[in-house]
Image (tube, helix red, strand yellow):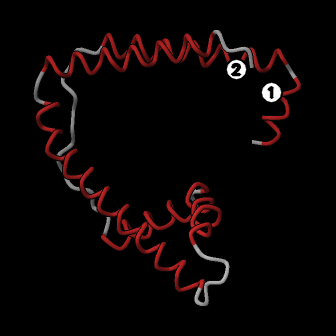
Amino acid sequence: MLGLAAVLHTSALAFAALKWCGVIYLFYMAWQALRERGALAVDARLDARSGRRVIVTGFLINILNPKLSIFFLAFLPQFIAADESHALLRMLELSGAFMAMTFAVFVVYGLFAASARDRIVTRPKVMIWLRRAFAGGFAALGAKLAFAER
């Protein structure tokens, strides 16, 4: 990635070529979203992964997420007093509170998504507007990229 970033930073032609490929691809995605007429196919079968594998995958995704590392190392310590006698314990308490709140929010997201899924997927008019919204989003991103300087 660093090599590609260096090439794109130093070569205006390479940057322009990649930029216009991205613009064309985004407009293609918009066109495909508008052209699609069939029902959205949602596979109802359950994933065959074990609970342990799901937990390990979720843990790895979160532990490798740089935003969480920055949050825990840069933001949370601000709430610990400099003269705190048990700074590690306080950090663990704050981290635990953060994780509990995050878990609660994700549970609510999951429940909402599960309840809204059937209402959205089974209504053709909703799906038409959803496709139009996606097409508009792709087209807007393509236009923004087309007019981007660098």
Image coordinates of residue 19 in percent, x first then y, are 68, 18
* Residue 140 vs residue 75, the one in the foreground: 75
How dense is the environment of label 2, judged by Cα within 10 Å: few (below 14), some, or many (20 and up)?
Answer: few
Q: What residue type is labelled 2?
A: Leu
Image coordinates of residue 105 in percent, x first then y, are 31, 56
The answer to whether 62 is drawn above or below residue 26 in the figure is below
Residue where numbered disc 1 is placed: 8
What number is the disc on residue 40? none
Q: What residue type is labelled 1?
A: Leu
The answer to whether 101 is drawn above or below residue 28 in the figure is below
Q: Which residue is drawn at 40% across and 10% down?
A: 31
The answer to whether 97 is drawn above or below residue 66 in the figure is below
Q: Please indicate whether residue 136 sits to the left or right of residue 144 in the image.
A: left
Q: In which quarter of the image is residue 134?
A: top left
How dense is the environment of label 1, judged by Cα within 10 Å: few (below 14), some, or many (20 and up)?
Answer: some
**Who comes first in sequence, dot 2 or dot 1?**
1
Q: Which residue extends farthest bottom? A: 85
Residue where numbered disc 2 is placed: 18
The answer to whether 133 is drawn above or below residue 102 in the figure is above
* Residue 10 vs residue 67, the one in the foreground: 67
- Dot 2 falls on a residue whose secondary structure is helix
Which quadrant does the C terminus fall into?
Answer: top right
